[in-house]
Amino acid sequence: MKIRLTRFFLFCFIWPLVFPSAGFCAAGKIKIVATSSTLASIAEEITDRKADIYFIAAPKRDIHFIAPTPKDVMKLKEADVFIHAGLDLEAWRDPLLNAVGRLDFMWPAGEKQIDVSKGISLLEVPETLSRAQGDIHVYGNPHYWMDPENAKIIARNIAEKLAALYPEDQEWFLRNAETFSRKIDGRLASWSREMVPYHGSPVVVYHASWSYFAERFGLVIAGELELKPGIPPAPKHISELVASMKEKHVRVIITEPYRERRTPDRIAKETGARVLTLTQSVGAFKEAQDYLSMLDYDLTKVAEGVKAGRETP
Ligand SMILES: [Zn+2]
């Protein structure tokens, strides 16, 4: 025991004095599990080396439909904090938590879970809560992190809850959230300027996951391939969509890496539109390794797509 305590003292107190970049006791890192790579990336900005962060949904998978693995269950059982998107984005969240058996991670009352949707102004909130016809956005559109203003709210939610759970590091978390917000403000100003020429451009999306992004950057969602969120494209709906795209001169279809390409490619062929594969998940592409570079990637692709569409007769 004496040897163990001596080692602990050396690693936790002497080591950081010699190497200030260590800054804290590695053994004392907070164990965080996040549902997505994007929430994990924002949590990384806030905790900055004070946490080991694990995420469940691989960046190229549909966050709505994940089959958690035994490793995910094990990680959650051992975690200190659970970060998730709230609402019904992660349809697998509650069954997973039931399997894990952690009441303190259960939504909405668990004291060690962080629902980052707190304080977000939701879009497309239905008048009645119903999963009729398989709708998977029953509380409103849950893809809110694609508006950088909402990423600031997410960061603050994470920082405030961590500050409450770990008051000794309160200043660290809150200051990092401020720094992240300032970085977003800086980039948002330039993104908004760069998108001005494309304001009002109509785009069609595969799934209703781009509403916040479109609203922030002045794009108009002119239709969805899915009949309702989560309901696959149906022939009648697609033929109506094609007619409407031709009429409105829609030249961009936005999809994600995990969706089938046959339908968007067929529509593109019939309408002269381009199919853009964008991402909402940090790490899905090598150019999108954190929140800011992910937005950069998506906005650059959209601007190029809309511009090319305009130049095509
Ligand atoms: Zn969705």
Image (cartoon, grey):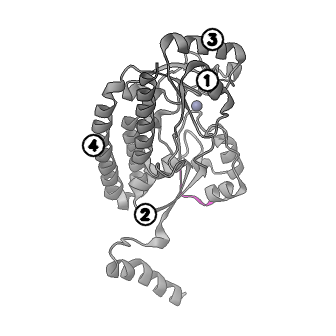
Q: Earlier in the sequence, mark 4 or mark 1?
A: 4
Q: CA distance from mark 4 to mark 2?
A: 26 Å
Quarter where residue 136 is shown:
top right
Of pointers 4 and 3, the one earlier in the residue sequence: 4
Which mark identifies residue 79? none
Q: Which residue is mark 4?
A: 186
The mark nearer the N terminus, 2 or 1, is: 2
| Number of the label disc, if any, that sits on residue 50 | 2
For label 3, the residue is 240
The mark total stands at 4
Q: Is residue 185 left or right of residue 79?
A: left
Res. 112 visible in picture: no
- Cβ at disc 1 under 8 Å from ligand 1: no
Which comes sooner in the sequence, label 3 or label 1?
3
- Give the mark, 2 or 3, whose residue is nearer the N terminus: 2
The image position of residue 226, as x and y in percent, is 63, 23
Q: Report the mark closest to the observer, 4 or 1.
A: 1
